[in-house]
Image (spheres, rainbow, N blue to C red):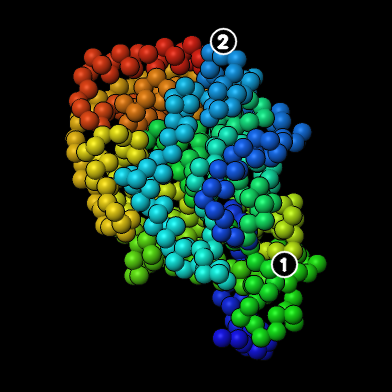
């Protein structure tokens, strides 16, 4: 129903009085056009020919040296049909190379596929274009290899931001890396003229070792862009509404966005994501918005739901920085974006206790998710309860020691037999000022019992490799 300008102004003022006066965020929005499934393969090759251009500002900005490098004999890496020459920045491990291209989110009888289909169905059923076709295009097989420009510069990540450190991400060389988030494709897709799209894929980050963290996980990104007419389609005469302005930035808006524009975007974004949360967790789920910060959106929020008595972060979202849209050739539009982790949602919805299980090929795991309809209620039933073996270790560390370096060695040598690595002591000698760290290392096979002798051999190999690569000294 159309509303008058007076009604619109009254509603905007009321909404503004309810807004938190502080906020930051991470994602952005784009226009959405439905394209054919065959076009989903285009970005991979197009990126190689046209988009994989790295700016000078992206190179040589690493502030930490990564020690656990491939063998010096490895001069190149062959990934998904492309060859990349290694250099001093290369830090990708054989364990990570093995996981590229598995696309767990595309496997039929897999929990990540079920949760992604549920989300996709929500958007397809609720958002249609003027031809009654689904508004949001889906990209779920884009190569995870991106340039530093795509992963950082296109998202306004500052040159010396910690996320650029070699200790945080996986680098093929000084110009290419494995994407740390699906947002890396956002700018390129907007450049193709898309107004609304979903991007699903595997992302790679160096992280701790425990039941809820893994160096490879899966994300879904959503983006939507609006023209002035589209954003204010509910207003009787949209020409009288201010869309852009030369104003000032504050906690509720960007400098180029008029107050009406920022509030309308926020309302549309939050309504979309509240309904998504209801679709996934039920109509009675309790929610709250938390102000957040991300380099490429402002203002920004995280959506939390009350789950089993505790607040759980579900996703991050926000208003896309206008500077990014300008760089992508969409300066006349505004938009929002969101991003969520598929494993985080699936672990809660299906009661999966250990993130390693997503990589299991055991039929006793996969058959539990072999259902026709993604909305089918599934509760994971443990099929094996093995006793863990715990080995403790303490060692002196060099000045440039990074825990993520150690965790990568643990994963590369011990694989998924290592359930967790927990720091329980961090000590600095009062006289020598040398630092010592001590860890509980828990070993547990998900399908059979491990003997202490097996664990001791694995543990020995891990420590020998850590001594060789990191220069630690076992106490």
> Residue at coordinates 67% horizontally, 52% vertically from top-left?
192
Residue bearing the label numbered 1: 257
Is 357 placed left or right of 166 in the picture?
left
Q: Inspect this view and state whether residue 66 appears.
A: no
Q: Position of residue 34 (x, y in %)?
A: 56, 59
Q: Nearer the viewer, residue 9 or 19?
A: 9
Q: Is residue 239 above or below residue 248?
A: below
Element at label 2: loop
Q: Is residue 409 above or below residue 351?
A: above
Q: Is residue 307 above or below residue 471?
A: below
- Give me the C-alpha separation between circle 1 and circle 2: 53 Å
Q: Inspect this view and state whether residue 16 appears.
A: yes
> Residue at coordinates 28% horizontally, 18% vertically from top-left?
455
Q: Position of residue 373 (x, y in %)?
A: 31, 57
Is 438 placed left or right of 23 in the picture?
left
Q: Residues within 10 Å of mark 2 (few under 14, many from 20)?
A: few
> Residue at coordinates 73% horizontally, 72% vertically from top-left?
243
Element at label 1: loop
Residue bearing the label numbered 2: 73
Is 262 placed left or right of 131 in the picture?
right
């Amino acid at each position: 129903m159309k509303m008058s300008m007076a009604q619109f102004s009254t509603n905007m003022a009321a909404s503004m009085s309810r807004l938190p006066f502080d906020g930051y965020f991470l994602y952005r929005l784009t226009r959405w056009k439905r394209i054919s499934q065959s076009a989903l393969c285009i970005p991979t090759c197009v990126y190689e020919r046209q988009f994989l251009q790295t700016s000078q500002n992206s190179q040589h900005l690493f502030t930490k040296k990564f020690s656990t490098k491939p063998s010096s004999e490895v001069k190149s890496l062959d990934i998904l049909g492309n060859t990349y020459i290694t250099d001093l920045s290369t830090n990708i491990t054989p364990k990570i190379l093995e996981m590229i291209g598995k696309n767990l989110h595309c496997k039929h009888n897999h929990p990540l596929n079920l949760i992604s289909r549920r989300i996709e169905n929500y958007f397809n059923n609720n958002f249609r274009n003027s031809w009654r076709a689904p508004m949001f295009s889906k990209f779920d097989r884009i190569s995870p290899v991106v340039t530093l420009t795509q992963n950082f510069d296109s998202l306004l990540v500052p040159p010396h931001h910690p996320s650029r450190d070699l200790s945080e991400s996986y680098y093929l060389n000084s110009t290419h890396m494995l994407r740390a988030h699906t947002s890396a494709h956002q700018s390129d897709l907007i450049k193709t003229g898309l107004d609304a799209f979903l991007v699903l894929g595997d992302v790679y980050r160096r992280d701790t070792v425990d039941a809820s963290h893994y160096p490879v996980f899966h994300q879904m990104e959503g983006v939507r862009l609006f023209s002035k007419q589209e954003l204010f389609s509910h207003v009787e005469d949209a020409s009288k509404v201010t869309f852009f302005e030369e104003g000032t930035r504050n906690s509720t808006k960007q400098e180029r966005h008029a107050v009406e524009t920022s509030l309308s975007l926020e309302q549309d974004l939050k309504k979309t994501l509240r309904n998504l949360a209801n679709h996934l967790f039920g109509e009675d789920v309790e929610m709250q918005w938390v102000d957040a910060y991300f380099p490429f959106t402002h203002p920004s929020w995280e959506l939390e739901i009350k789950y089993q008595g505790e607040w759980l972060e579900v996703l991050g979202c926000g208003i896309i920085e206008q500077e990014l849209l300008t760089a992508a050739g969409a300066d006349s539009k505004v938009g929002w974006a969101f991003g969520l982790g598929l494993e985080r949602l699936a672990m809660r919805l299906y009661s999966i206790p250990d993130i390693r299980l997503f990589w299991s090929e055991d039929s006793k795991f996969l058959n539990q998710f072999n259902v026709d309809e993604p909305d089918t209620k599934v509760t994971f039933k443990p099929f094996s309860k093995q006793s863990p073996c715990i080995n403790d270790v303490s060692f002196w560390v060099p000045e440039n020691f990074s825990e993520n370096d150690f965790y990568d060695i643990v994963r590369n040598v011990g694989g998924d037999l290592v359930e967790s690595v927990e720091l329980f002591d961090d000590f600095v000698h009062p006289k020598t000022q040398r630092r010592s760290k001590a860890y509980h290392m828990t070993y547990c096979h998900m399908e059979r019992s491990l003997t202490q002798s097996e664990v001791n051999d694995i543990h020995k190999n891990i420590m020998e490799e850590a001594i060789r690569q990191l220069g630690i000294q076992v106490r």
